[in-house]
Image (cartoon, helix red, strand yellow):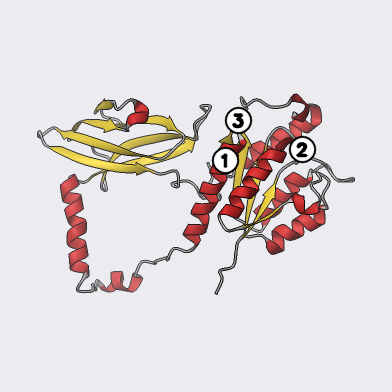
Amino acid sequence: MDQIKPNVFVSSTYEDLRDHREAVRDAIRQLGAIDISMEHFGARDARPKDECLRLISEESDCFVGIYAHRYGKCQKGTPMSITEAEYIKAREIKLPRFVYMVDEDAPWNPKHIDVGASKKLLLKFKNGIKSELIVRHFDTKYRLAANVAADLGRHFATEKLMRVEPSVDAYKNNTRLATSKEWNKCRDGVYKNNQGLFLIHNLSPSMKPGQLYDIFIFLRKHRTDDLSDVEYAEFFLGPYWGNRVFKVINQGELVGLWTSAYGEFLCVCRVKLKNGSHVMLSRYIDFGSYWSPDIPA
């Protein structure tokens, strides 16, 4: 039996993002999904608002918003553009939302840049989105399409993952399955080998042109903030950083570093403890940590 293909509503202004929309539509179709976009209305900025909102409410599985320097057309009698109305409808029905905004420094045709009242409305709209979601930035249609493909691909994949819940009854009754002893032995071995140390990373949208995220990588100890037994940590991030080793001395605060990147990578860390021993840790820096469109920045 054929699987049902997900419907992706693509929202943006048209004339300024014509080529970008085409690249995104191709990416969506390559994922095996169906794009729902204004091209179905004859590629007009003044597409029927009610029909767009109906499609979002009744026929869409997720929402992709692409925004540059135009606010979009407003139908007669309303100060809100159709583009913003589409986003608000997707938010109201809690549709998974993926939003992409052009880098402010990316070259852009001046005739497609709003001024005056429209610019103010656009800025308010964008700032409102940024207060709600993690926003990806793009400079070219190729970067945009790659980001959309990665985000939607991850979303479609996670929809198929098995969800597991903790066993509350087993916890209350302190009962365990026989095989759990082996699993706990393995788990306790990880704690012991790491001496309770682990690498953690956080992401935030990068303000640097050409980068997607600022990444904060640091040491964390199981169930405590006490790192007094750590002398220093050496971080190795790979060839993009010149194959250098970054040594961070423990000065009583966070033991870690931060960097910017446009792609995922593996971080390897060697921790020197004050008793003379070493602990080797690793952390795959994946951009899925805050990928969910419902997690605020």
What kind of element bears circle 3? loop
Distance from disc 1 to disc 3, alpha carbons, whole Å, reads 11 Å
Residue 235: x, y in percent? 27, 32
Distance from disc 2 to disc 3, alpha carbons, whole Å, reads 18 Å
Circles 1 and 3 in contact, beta carbons < 8 Å? no
Q: Amino acid at mark 2?
A: Glu
| Tag of residue 135 | 1
| Tag of residue 105 | none
Sequence-wise, the earlier of marks 1 and 3 is 3
Sequence-wise, the earlier of marks 2 and 3 is 2
- Of the pair 23 and 105, the residue shown nearer to us: 23
Distance from disc 1 to disc 2, alpha carbons, whole Å, reads 22 Å
What kind of element bears circle 2? helix
Q: Amino acid at mark 3?
A: Asp
Sequence-wise, the earlier of marks 1 and 2 is 2
Horizontal side of 245 relative to 110 (left or right) equals left
* Residue 136 seen: no
So how many labels did they put on this image? 3
| Tag of residue 103 | 3
| Tag of residue 15 | 2
Circles 2 and 3 in contact, beta carbons < 8 Å? no
Q: Residue at x 44, y 63 (%)?
A: 161
Q: Amino acid at mark 1?
A: Val
Q: Which mark is in front, 1 or 3?
A: 3
Q: From the viewer's perspective, is residue 252 above or below residue 54? A: above
Q: Residue at x 18, y 67 (%)?
A: 181
